[in-house]
Image (tube, rainbow, N blue to C red):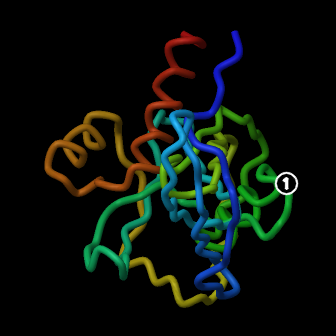
Amino acid sequence: MYEAPSKTKVSSKIVYQNPWITIHEDQTISQDGNTGIYGYMESRDSCMVVVLDDQERLYLVRGFRYPSQSFGWELPGGGGDNEDLLKASKRELEEETGIIAQSWQKLGEAYVCNGLLTEKMAVCLARELSFTGQREQSDEVFSDMRFFTLNEIDDLIRSGEINDCQTLAGLHYYQLWRKDTT
């Protein structure tokens, strides 16, 4: 069944741009003829990696996020550099954690915030792990990284220590995968 968009773009202008994001302001017209503006941010697609060890534990990183001025536990991941998101997942995992996985599976995709961002996120499962002991230097500094059981992760969610929507979506995709494979 076809659904017509509720708004149509009349014109668009870029109001801000840097190497990572572009902010657009569109002039729109709705189905009833009302005109308005709609602002949104364009950014590269991203990936989140669910890292599963042979004891059924998941690997999380803890870091500081400047926009929210807060620390939290997250799945490893990041922005794709205009590359296939599975390839980006492999690169991000090794750069951030020094982990290499032999087994990879895409669990799903979702828009990060489809009312505000163009960014789509892929969630990939990484298994059969080895540790290189090397991490790439970057401006993203993680204060801790380690494995957690699912019960511990539930406690981190309840306490607000996991409060990143991309991580929560990635964990949910993992739970769906577990239900489908057990």
Horizontal side of residue 6 vs 150, given as left or right? right
- 101 shown above or below 145: above
Mark 1 = which residue?
A: 84
Q: Quadrant of residue 103?
A: top right
Q: Quadrant of residue 71?
A: bottom left
Horizontal side of residue 152 vs 107, given as left or right? left
Q: Nearer the viewer, residue 28 or 147?
A: 28
- 101 shown above or below 151: below
Q: Nearer the viewer, residue 109 or 171?
A: 109
Which quadrant, please, contains the N terminus?
top right
Residue drawn at point x = 43 percent, y = 77 percent: 142
Q: Nearer the viewer, residue 108 or 20?
A: 20
Which quadrant, please, contains the C terminus?
top right
Q: Quadrant of residue 124?
A: top right
User: Which amino acid is tagged 1?
Assistant: Asp
Coordinates of residue 82 in the picture (x, y in percent): 83, 66
Instruction: Rate crowding at label 1 as few (under 14), some (14 to 19) or many (20 or more) other CA atoms within 10 Å.
Output: few
